Each structure stands twice: as C-alpha cells, then as structure tokens.
Amino acid sequence: MGERRSTVERLAPTGVRRMELEEALELRTNWRHACHALLYAPDPGLLFRRIPLRYAVLMQMRFDGRLGFPGGFVNFPDSSLEDGLNRELSEELGQAVAAFRVERADYRSSYASAESSGPRVVAHFYAKRLTLEQLTAVERGAPLAQDHGLEVLGLVRVPLYTLQDGVSGLPAFLENTFIGTAREQLLEALQELGLLESGSVIRP
C-alpha cells in the first residue's frame, strides 16, 4: 500500500475512512469534530523483575464499558482543535494536565465516519510524550477530575509485552471492546512511534 491516502485505509473499520488533516478541516456543515489523545512516557520498570515495560501508555475505561482515549467533541471551528482537546483533557483527567499541552505537532491522524443512519463525525487523534512523573501525576489526579465516575470510569495502562504463552499481555488486551477507531489508532501509534520491542508483531 505504500503511502498514506485520503481514502479507506487497511486498518479502518467498514464505513470509516482515513483522511489528511487539511481535508478533514474542510468538513464543517453537519459534521462534528472530536479529538482524542494517547498519552505515553518512557518507563524503565520491569514486570516481575524481568519483563521490560518500555513505555507507559494510557487508555481509559468509558461509561459504556469500552476502551478509548481521553478527549471528546470540540467546538470547531469556533476554537482550534487543540484548544478543545486540552479542555476535554482537563475535564476528564484533572489538574495534572496543566503541566503540559497537546499541540498541533502531536497530531497523528483523522478518521471520518458518515453512515446514513448515524452522526457525521470526524475524529482527530494525537499522541503526546510525557515524562513518567507527569504521566503518573495524571493517573493519581484523574479520580478527582470533573468527569471521573461519569463519562470516565478509570485509566488503564496498555501492556506492551507478550508473555510466553503468546496470548497474555498485549494480544489479550487487544481482544477488549474499543470505541470507534481507538483500536486502530492504538495499533498505528505503537508501531509508528516505536513503542514496541523491535521485531514485535501485531495482528491487525
């Protein structure tokens, strides 16, 4: 497949197409824009004193029991995507997010969904690298956030390892139910940002 295209991509679910940001920003009338962010940090820790954790990657358990990323609908074009996203992060994750800001440089992808029976939504995805101290502060402060226990039930770390049985760890985690394109966004980010060990294989 080679280069990225603004048509349906190999990982996108049926009815969803990936597009370049410039094209996505033209979708205004009758379209809603949502922004979500993957927060991650290098983690030198070891599981059971022998399995490298490599990175801490955050996702959240949503009110509907599905996994997703922090964020939500934004008031585009009345404000920038990033302003809206940072407001959403503050509501969902609490005061610790004041220590950093997700910027346009952290942008990764956009997916549009326009099924005839559903809403017309374009979802923008970002990935922000933090220090482990910043990420840990987010985890500790999240239960005090405005939306905790309502829209957000809690944060989880993605296991980036696979245990000897070949199933436990990341493969088992990917069997959970994800909202929208969150699973595809996670897989792309892990691969493109080099968050997995060299040679690790992820089945789409």
Image (spheres, grey):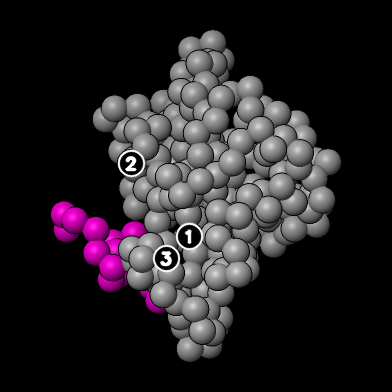
- Locate the N terminus by quadrant: bottom left
Q: Nearer the viewer, residue 64 or 39?
A: 39
Q: Which residue is drawn at 49% across and 24% down?
A: 42
**Whether residue 12 is visible:** no
Q: How crowded is mark 1: few (under 14 residues within 10 Å), some or many (20 or more)?
A: many
Give the residue number, with chain letter if any, for mark 2.
192
Q: Up-down: is 128 above or below 112?
A: above
Residue 26: % across, % down: 41, 75
What's the amino acid at mark 3? Tyr
Q: Are marks 3 and 1 in contact (CB under 8 Å)?
A: no
What's the amino acid at mark 1? His
In the image, farthest residue toward the top:
49
- The image's mark for residue 111 is 3
Residue 64: % across, % down: 69, 62
| Earlier residue among tags 2 and 1 | 1
Task: Label 2, secondary structure: give it.
Answer: helix
Q: Which of 152 and 31 is in front in this view?
A: 31
Between the C-alphas of marks 3 and 1, the distance is 7 Å
Q: Residue at x 36, y 66 (%)?
A: 22
Q: Any magenta on residue 151?
A: no
**Whether residue 15 is visible:** yes
| Earlier residue among tags 3 and 1 | 3
Task: Label 3, secondary structure: give it.
Answer: strand
Q: Residue at x 24, y 58 (%)?
A: 4
Q: Residues within 10 Å of mark 2 (few under 14, many from 20)?
A: few
Give the residue number, with chain letter if any, for mark 1.
124
Q: Any magenta on residue 11?
A: yes
Which segment is the magenta one? 1-15
Residue 202 lies left or right of residue 143; in this view the side is left
